[in-house]
Image: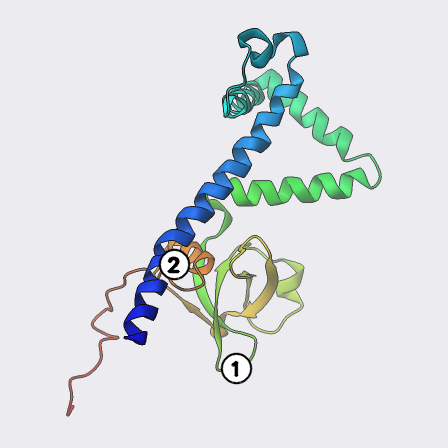
């Protein structure tokens, strides 16, 4: 009876915890984006015009701001303005370190996964006999390759469950195992703490031999 009760309680937690976490995160993001309404003059704000506030209206405003900024930044004139802004921020001491770091992280996180990470691999880490997922990143390592013995591969070893932090490693190619799973599948596995395992059909060369063989 105790085992059955425990099973039902755990099942209930598995159902409700992700739902509650999702609701709380969305609620936090909506409240955060609602603060974008402060850019509107007080007399023009919806609560002043309508007499009541509309939750989530800041989401619409934030969406429009991002959309308009993206449209302006994508054309030739806007691109020139954005490039000039990047150069200006890159000349300010202290600010340039923070700005350039945040810019590189944003470009890596929000760019197409296939452009950021090329292959999913296994590397023995943190010691021989233990394996960790990693992503091949840069190619053409120039000085790094010239100063190492044998061919090395630049890989990013992400942490779990936050794959935006991790370690940059230069690993001998012979010590890496290339996987068939896609970058998106590997990221889902890392974020889910290994709970979400992508399906895989073993090729005949890796299939287990029949019993008695």
**Residue 134, image x, y percentages:** 49, 63
Q: Is residue 126 left or right of residue 22?
A: right
Q: Secondary structure at mark 2?
A: helix
The quadrant the C terminus occupies is bottom left
Q: Residue at x 36, y 64 (%)?
A: 10
Quadrant of the image occupied by residue 100: top right
**Residue 97, image x, y percentages:** 76, 43
Q: Which mark is residue 128?
A: 1
Tell me how far mark 1 sits from mark 2, CA to CA.
37 Å
Q: Residue at x 62, y 26 (%)?
A: 35
Q: Residue at x 38, y 63 (%)?
A: 195
Quadrant of the image occupied by residue 125: bottom right
Q: Nearer the viewer, residue 1 or 104?
A: 1
Q: Is residue 51 left or right of residue 102?
A: left
What residue is disc 2 on?
Answer: 13
Q: Is residue 203 left or right of residue 139?
A: left
**Residue 69, image x, y percentages:** 57, 21
Quadrant of the image occupied by residue 91: top right
Report the mark closest to the observer, 1 or 2. Answer: 2
Q: Within 10 Å of the Cα at label 1, are there few (<14), some (14-19), or many (20+) other Cα atoms?
A: few
Q: Earlier in the sequence, mark 1 or mark 2?
A: 2
Count of numbered labels shown in the rendering: 2
């Amino acid at each position: 009876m105790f085992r059955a009760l425990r099973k039902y309680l755990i099942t209930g937690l598995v159902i409700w915890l992700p739902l509650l976490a999702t609701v709380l995160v969305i609620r936090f993001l909506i409240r955060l984006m609602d603060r974008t309404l402060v850019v509107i003059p007080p007399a023009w704000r919806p609560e002043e015009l309508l007499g009541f506030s509309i939750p989530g209206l800041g989401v619409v405003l934030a969406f429009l701001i991002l959309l308009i900024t993206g449209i302006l930044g994508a054309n030739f004139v806007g691109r020139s303005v954005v490039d000039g802004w990047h150069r200006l921020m890159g000349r300010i001491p202290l600010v340039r370190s923070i700005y350039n770091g945040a810019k590189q992280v944003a470009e890596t996180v929000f760019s197409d996964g296939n452009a950021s990470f090329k292959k999913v691999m296994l590397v023995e880490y943190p010691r021989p006999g233990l394996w960790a997922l990693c992503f091949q990143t840069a190619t053409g390592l120039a000085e790094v390759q010239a100063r190492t013995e044998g061919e090395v591969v630049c890989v990013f070893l992400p942490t779990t469950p936050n794959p935006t932090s991790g370690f940059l490693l230069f690993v001998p190619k012979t010590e890496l195992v290339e996987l068939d799973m896609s970058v998106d599948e590997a990221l889902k596995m890392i974020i889910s703490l290994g709970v979400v395992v992508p399906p895989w059909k073993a090729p005949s060369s890796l299939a287990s031999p029949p019993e008695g063989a």
